């Protein structure tokens, strides 16, 4: 968990200071107070510095509260897994550009407010160095902890929001083809699949293999070769499957949730840093295998798959589009069957990063290939659940 430290406005980067002053001016505060808290994430967020900024005061209309969340870019020369500059440009594109198109399209189609794709409000002051958003935590939203078990309601809402995101991107491709081709189709996967990445995956596979004996252990060790060959192909494949703009990192630590009466009632996806043009099922597989447990998958995996396709179909109808001409059920089922093992590969990859962070390992202090091979033991049941699924299904 992060610790929040009080800081002064004058201690912020000059460009961020100017952005905050601009927001105050546009809001027309007559007098105001500013409280700024810096998140000491203890290494959990290595791509940006995080701030909560609360402005309270008086306007001509009366008392006003402005709650802001800021992600300030950190120049990062030592982290080679992704380009820090590119992931910031990705997120700015979503919040400054694409979110406005989403709103316009849903307005034109008269999509009911309660059924719209949910995205955090971005301030115009968002620029090349800082993402400035409405602070939804002040409205009761939070993220789940890494080891927190999700309910079927959580999984259903997450799948539905994912399907709406993909549907809107299919709509843009149909209604704004030039924009789609020039701005969205050109976005490539940001992950660098180099020798250092291979070393990281070797470490993760070695740890997971150590949880088993004999035959299963040998199969997991051999799976490493399959993983380093196929995962880059899956992430970069834009020709053999139906593609659109995908989130790329759709898992529970990137989903804000609002809870009522003990269960999730609303989900807002965040952290669009890894968006790219690719197969939409990659988002589905990552969510399912990184964020649910084996018991939920045994009971509900097929239902969640069907929910995704039904939501995609239903949401496209707002825009007078037939899912069968966009992403037919036959194509969908074929892609699902052929790429299910992506769920195992990408979950091992992302989990290795997440669990290393949870163990307070500095990812920027040396090669990823030198990370310890034994993440926190409390996650071993998670790994076993995913591995046992893929053994049962014949992939291992």
Image (cartoon, rainbow, N blue to C red):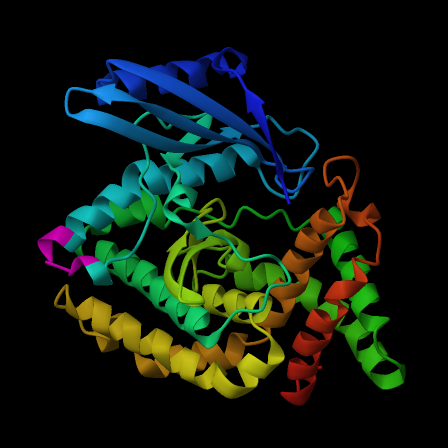
Q: Which residue lies furthest to the right in this view?
A: 214
Q: Position of residue 384 (x, y in %)?
A: 73, 76
Quadrant assignment for the N terminus? top right
Coordinates of residue 205 in the picture (x, y in percent): 78, 65
Q: Which of the 4 quarters of the picture holds residue 379?
A: bottom right
**Image quarter of the C terminus:** bottom right
Residue at the image position 23 percent from the left and 63 percent from the top: 115
- The answer to whether residue 178 is visible is no
Q: Going 52% across and 71% down the picture, which residue do you hit?
A: 288
Residue located at (16% from left, 52% from top): 105
Question: How many numbered marks are there?
Answer: 0
Instruction: Name the image quarter holding residue 91.
Output: top left
252 and 5: which is toward the camera: 5
Residue nearest the viewer, comparing 111 with 316 = 111
The reply to whether residue 195 is visible in this rendering is: yes
Side (left or right) of 383 relative to 218 = left
Location of residue 119 with respect to 131 vertically, above or below: below
Q: In this view, does 118 lie to the left or right of 186?
A: left
Nearer to me, 260 or 22: 260
| Residue in view at x 34 percent, y 40 percent | 95
Q: Residue 347, relative to residue 2: is it above or below? A: below
Highlighted range, magenta: 107-113
Residue 96 point in image, percent of width and height? 31, 36
Q: Does the magenta stretch include residue 319?
A: no
Residue 210: image location, x then y, percent: 86, 71
């Amino acid at each position: 968990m992060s610790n929040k430290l009080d800081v002064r406005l004058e201690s912020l980067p000059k460009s961020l200071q100017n952005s905050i002053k601009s927001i105050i001016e546009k809001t027309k505060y007559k007098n105001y107070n500013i409280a700024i808290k810096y998140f000491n994430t203890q290494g959990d967020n290595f791509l940006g510095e995080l701030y909560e900024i609360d402005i309270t005061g008086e306007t001509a209309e009366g008392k006003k509260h402005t709650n802001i969340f800021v992600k300030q870019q950190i120049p990062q020369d030592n982290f080679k897994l992704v380009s820090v500059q590119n992931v910031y440009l990705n997120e700015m594109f979503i919040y400054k550009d694409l979110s406005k198109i989403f709103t316009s399209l849903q307005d034109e189609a008269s999509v009911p407010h309660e059924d719209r794709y949910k995205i955090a409000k971005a301030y115009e002051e968002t620029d090349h160095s800082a993402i400035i958003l409405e602070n939804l935590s002040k409205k009761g939203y939070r993220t789940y902890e890494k080891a927190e078990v999700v309910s079927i309601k959580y999984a259903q809402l997450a799948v539905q929001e994912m399907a709406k995101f993909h549907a809107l991107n299919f709509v843009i491709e149909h209604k704004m083809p030039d924009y789609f081709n020039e701005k969205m189709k050109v976005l490539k996967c940001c992950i660098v699949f180099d020798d250092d990445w291979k070393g990281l995956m070797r470490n993760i596979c070695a740890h997971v293999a150590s949880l088993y004996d004999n035959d299963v252990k040998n199969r997991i060790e051999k799976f490493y070769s399959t993983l380093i060959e196929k995962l880059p192909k899956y992430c970069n494949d834009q020709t053999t499957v139906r593609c659109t703009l995908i989130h790329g990192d759709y898992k529970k630590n990137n989903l804000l949730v609002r809870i009522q009466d003990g269960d999730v009632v609303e989900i807002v996806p965040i952290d669009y840093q890894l968006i790219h043009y690719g197969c939409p099922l990659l988002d589905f597989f990552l969510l399912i295998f990184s964020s649910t447990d084996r018991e939920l998958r045994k009971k509900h995996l097929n239902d969640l798959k069907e929910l995704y396709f039904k939501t995609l179909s239903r949401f496209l109808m707002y825009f007078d589009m037939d899912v069968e001409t966009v992403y037919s059920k036959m194509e969908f089922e074929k892609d699902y069957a052929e790429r299910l093992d992506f769920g195992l590969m990408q979950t091992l990859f992302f989990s290795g990063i997440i669990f290393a962070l949870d163990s307070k390992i500095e990812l920027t202090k040396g090669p990823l290939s030198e990370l310890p091979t034994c993440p926190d033991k409390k996650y071993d049941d998670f790994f076993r659940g995913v591995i046992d699924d893929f053994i049962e299904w014949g992939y291992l």
